[in-house]
Image (cartoon, rainbow, N blue to C red):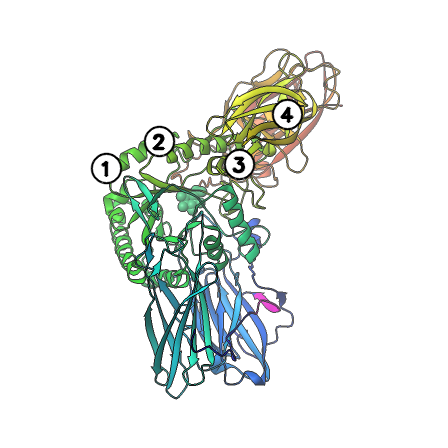
Amino acid sequence: MSNPLKIKAQRQERTINESWKFQKGENLHASDSLFNDNNWTSINIPHTWNTDAYVVKDYYRGTGWYRKTLYLSEKDKGKMQFLKFEAANQAAKVFLNGHFVGEHKGGYTAFTFDITPFCIYGKRNIIAVEVNNNSSEVPPVSADYTFFGGIYRDVWLITTPKKQHLELLNSASSGVFIDTPIVSQSSASFSVRGGIKNDAATKVTLKLIHQVYNPDGKLIQRLENRISLTAGETKKFKTPGKDVVNPQLWSPESPNLYTIETYIADSKNNQIIDKVANHFGFRWYHFDGNKGFFLNGKPYKLRGICRHQDQPPTGNAMSDEMHRRDMLLAKDMGTNFIRLAHYPQDEAILEQCDKLGILVWEETPIIDMVPDSKPFEQVCETNLREMIRQHYNHPAIITWGYMNEILLATQRKFSKQEQVPVIKRTLDLAKHLEQVVKAEDPYRQSTIAFHGSDSYNDVGLSSITNVIGWNLYQGWYGGKMDGFDNFLEKQHNKYPDHPIIISEYGAGSDKRVHSFLPQSFDFSIEYQQGYLEYYLPVIEKKSYVSGSTLWNFIDFASALRDESMPRINNKGILYTNRSPKDVFYYYKAFFRKDIPVLHIATRDWNSRAGIEQGNDSVVQPIKIYSNLSQVELFIDGRSLGIKKTDNYNAIWQVPFTFGKHYIYAKGVYDSRIVEDGSNVFFQTIPEQLNKDNLKGLELAINVGSNCYFTSDESGLTWICDKPYTPGSWGYVGGKMYHTNDYSIGTQTQIKNTFDNPLYQTLRTGLEGYSFDVPEGEYEVELLFADVFNSGTEIIYNIGDNKQAQTSGNVFDIYINDKLAESDVNIGAQYGYFSSVKKRFVVSASKDGVYVKLSPKMGKTFLNGIKLRKL
Ligand code: L9D
Ligand code: CA
C-alpha cells in the first residue's frame, strides 16, 4: 500500500520491577531524594507486604514505602517519560526526585503519570511510592478475602521519543478504543476511537494511521487521516473502518483476534512518532430471560468459575505466568466463562481469556455495603471507568459488574429503620454506576451479584442492571440443597424476563477430612463433591439460567476466616498450589466432550483407614469421574465389574485389606482404550481389639465427628466416632456438639495446633469412653479444646452466632476407676479455643480401659482420644 511508514523513533515500554527498596510504616522523609534507604529491604515487584495474612488474622494494614533509583541517559532529553503502575493496593502516592507526581485510589486498576517535568538526565532519579492498604475511601469496605497491600503488579517506564503521542493519561488505557457496533456472520462494522496529545509548545500536523490485520496476520485495511493540534492540545478522533465481509468471528471454540496498529507519523516525512497495537474481536451476543445466553446466534451455556488472585507464599503478587497458568487450567477443564470476582484482574488474565476463548464478567469490588462517604462513591466511579477503559478492547468481556452482595452487611448491621438511608444511597450509587457503564460502553451488558434474598427485587436493585447474578448457597449456609431449585423457580416465575447467572455456588473442603455421612460445614471432600454434583446438573437443566460461575476456582486467602483451614476460604476445586481436587475432574468430565476424561477420585484420599467388618477387610466406595458411558474398575488387577456412569461418575464398593493397593480404571473412547491408575494405602482398624492386632496400632478417634481426619504432619488418621458396643470401643452417652443446625463442631480456630477439624469437633455431656482391650499397659491420650466460653464464634455469612453461656466446665477424669486428674477446667486452665493433649499411662485389668469424665460444674466434653498398647 502507498505511503510506507518509516520507522525511526519508537515508543519504548519496559518494566522496572527490579531493585526496589521497601519499608513498612509511615515515613515523613522517604519521598526526599536524599533520603538514605540503605537499611531498607531489597525487593522485586510484584510485591506484597502481607504474607503475614496467611498466618495471622490481624495482618498488617497500613502504610508501606517503596523507593527505586532510575538512571536516565542524556540521550533521553527531549523525550517524554511516563510511569505506569498496573496496580497498587489500595491507594498510592508517587514522587519523583522529591516532587509529588500524583495519587491513585483503588487497588485493582492501573494508573499512569507523566513524570517528564521532574526527570533529570545523565543522573540518578529517585522514585518513591507511598502505598497503603487501610483506606476507608477505597472499595470494598469489607469482604471475604485478604486485602494484600503493596505494588503487586508490574511497573512500567514508557518513553515516547517526541512530544506527540497517543493519549497515555486516559485512565491508563491504551488510548485507543475499538468499537464493533454491528456484527453478523456476513459483515462486521468497526471504528477506532482515541486521543492524541501534543505536549509541545508549537502546533503540529500529524498523520493518524490505522492498519488492520486479520487473524492470519494479513493487512486488510489502512485508514489514514490528517490531524492538526495546537500547543498542549489533546485531540479526540473517531475513525470509521470499512465493514469487514465474512468476519472470522471470535468464540470460545475459535478465539479469532484481529489487530489494529495505530500510528501517528510526521505528516511531511512519514516518520513514525508513536504506535499502539490492540487486539480485538468480532462477536455478538445477548442474554434472554427465558432462553439463556446466545453467542454469534447460537445458544451457549456459560460454564464458568469465579477466580481470586492469590497463591501462597506470594499472596496477590503473582507473576504473569502464574496468572496465565490459571487460565490454562480453566480452559483445560472446559470452562468457557469466568467471573473475575471481585475486582479487575491482571492484564495477563484478560489477554489469556482473549486468546484461549474464555468469556469474561469483570467487576469492581463494591461489596457488602455502601458506606456513607462521598469520596468512596467517587472512587467507585473512577475505578469503574478505569476498568472499562483499560479492558475495553478485549472481545472476551461480555459484562461489567459493579456490586456484590451489597445488601448483606447492610441488613446484618442495621435495624430496619436504619437501613432506609443505606438502601437509598445504595440504589442511587447503583443507578449512577449503571449510567457510567452505559456511557463508557454502550455495547456490553451490566451485572450485579446478589445474595439469596428477595430484598434485591423489593428495593429495586434488580431492575437497574441488565443481568442478575445470584450467589446461592442453599445447603451450605443453611437450608437444603433443593432450596436452590426452588429459589430459582420462584425467581423465574416472578421475573420471567430477567436474565440470570448463578454467579456463585460452592462448598468448602479440606483434603484431611473425609466422611461417609457428609454434612455442610464438616469440610469433608465428600460433602463438597456431593454439593457440586447436585448444583451443576440443576444449572445445566434450567434453560432460563444463562450459566454459572462456581465459587471458587481456587482455595484463596481470606485472613478473617477460621474454619478448618484458618486464613483460607477452601471452596476451591484447586488447592492453593493449583493441584486439582478430585472434583475438578467432575467439571472436566461434564464440560469436555472433545477428549476422554477418566479420573479415579481418590487422589484426595489416598491414605485411608476404616474399621474391619467381620473379616479382615473393609469395604469403602471408590468413585470415578468420567465422560465415558461405562468404565471398568480393578483393584490389584482384579476386576470389580463394569459400571455405567451417571452424572459423569460411577461408584464401586471396594474391599480393602491392610496395605498398599493399586486401583485401575479402564474405558473406551472412540475405539481407543482410556485408563487411569492410583495407589491407595489402607489402614484397617480391628473392631475387636486383641493381643495381636493391638501391636503397633495407634487407635486414634476423632471424637464428636463422623469424619475421618488425617494429620498432614504425622500422617495419622483419626477415625470417625462411634458408640460403645461390648467387645469393641466407643463413647458412652452425650451428644455431638454443633453451634447451629447445619454444621458440626465450632468454626472458630483452635490455637496451638494445625489439626483444627480434630479439635473443632467434640462430644459433650458424655459419661466417658470405653475400650474392651486385654490386660496390659496402655497409653491413653485425651484431646480437649474448650469452645464454650470467652472465644467469639466467627462464622462468615450466617448471621447471629449462638454461644453457650456457662461459667466454666469442670470435671474429674478417672481411668479404670482411679482418679487420673481432678477439677479439670480446660478453658480456665489452658485458655479457651486452645488445644490440650493429656497423656496417661494406665494398667488395664481384664475389664479393659474405661475413661470416665465426672462433671462437677457445667458439662463434660471430649474432642479426641487415642489408645496405644505399650
Ligand atoms: C459470597 C460468599 C463467599 C464469599 C464471597 C461472597 C463465601 N459469602 O467468599 O466473597 O460473594 O465463600 O462465603 O457470596
Ligand atoms: Ca473431634
Visible residue check, residue 655: no
Tell me the tag on residue 271.
none
Give the mark nearer the N terminus: 1 vs 4.
1
Give the mark nearer the N terminus: 3 vs 2.
2
Q: Is residue 689 left or right of residue 542?
A: right
Give me the residue at 38% from left, 35% from top: 540
Give the x, y percent position of residue 793: 46, 39
Q: CA distance from mark 1 to mark 3?
A: 36 Å
Q: Is residue 505 left or right of residue 777?
A: left
Q: CA distance from mark 1 to mark 4?
A: 50 Å
Q: Dividing the picture into quarters, in which one does residue 125 lie? A: bottom right
Please determine whether, in this image, residue 749 is positioned above or below residue 134.
above
Give the mark nearer the N terminus: 2 vs 4.
2
Give the x, y percent position of residue 611: 62, 19
- Residue that label 4 marks: 609
Visible residue check, residue 9: yes
- Residue that label 3 marks: 585
Q: CA distance from mark 3 to mark 2?
A: 26 Å
